[in-house]
Image (spheres, rainbow, N blue to C red):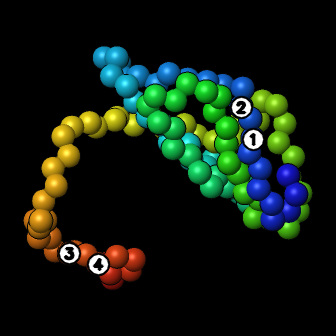
């Protein structure tokens, strides 16, 4: 992977992610600290519960140096998450909250 470049890295892995009770689950792909220390970070990573294809990892090289990824390297963490389904209700107003519609930086941090 060239410096300041991106790549789609094939893993050769496909999964069917389910809970211990058999409920469908999605998964998140997140950075590994060892890769991030080399300035190789993930730029995508939501795996839908119904996806059955090969997992591919979208990586960005933020370094000026080329990087090599070899077969067997641990390049990402996979974190399962529950899929919540239910009826969607359209409303005219939402309940009030202390944050209201404040976005980026509005909480004072």
Residue 100 appears left or right of 10: left
Say which element carries label 2: loop
Q: Secondary structure at mark 4?
A: loop
For marks 4 and 1, the one nearer the N-term is: 1
Vertically, is 18 above or below 45?
above
Front-most of residues 47 and 105: 47
Q: Position of residue 91 (x, y in %)?
A: 13, 59
In the image, is 71 to the left or to the right of 30? right
Q: CA distance from mark 4 to mark 1?
A: 37 Å
- 104 vs 7: above or below: below
Q: CA distance from mark 3 to mark 4?
A: 6 Å
Distance from Cα at disc 2 to Cα at disc 1: 6 Å
Specify few, some or many for label 3: CA neighbours under 10 Å numbering under 14, 14-19, or 20 or more.
few
**Residue 97 located left or right of residue 49:** left
Q: Which residue is mark 4?
A: 102
Question: What residue is disc 1 on?
Answer: 9
- Circle 2 residue: 11
Numbered mark located on residue 100 in the image? 3
Disc 4 to disc 2, how far (Cα)?
39 Å
Q: Residue at x 72, y 26 (%)?
A: 12
Measured Cα–Cα span from mark 2 to mark 3: 42 Å
Check whether the beta carbons of the residues at disc 3 and disc 4 lie within 8 A of each other: yes
Whether residues under marks 2 and 3 lie with C-beta atoms below 8 angstroms apart, the answer is: no
N-term mark: 1 or 3:
1
| Label ID, residue 53 | none
Mark 4 or mark 2: whose residue is earlier in sequence: 2
Going by the picture, which residue comes out furthest to the top?
21
In terms of secondary structure, where does tag 3 sit?
Answer: loop
Residue 37 at x, y percent in the picture = 71, 57
């Amino acid at each position: 992977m060239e410096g300041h470049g991106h790549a789609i890295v094939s893993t050769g892995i496909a999964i069917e992610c389910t809970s211990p009770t058999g409920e469908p689950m999605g998964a998140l792909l997140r950075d590994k600290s060892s890769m991030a220390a080399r300035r190789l970070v993930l730029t995508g990573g939501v795996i839908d519960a119904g996806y059955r294809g090969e997992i591919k990892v979208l990586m960005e090289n933020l370094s000026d140096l080329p990087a090599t990824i070899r077969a067997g390297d641990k390049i990402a963490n996979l974190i399962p998450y529950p899929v919540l389904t239910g009826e969607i209700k359209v409303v005219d107003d939402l309940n009030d909250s202390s944050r209201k519609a404040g976005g980026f930086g509005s909480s004072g941090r």
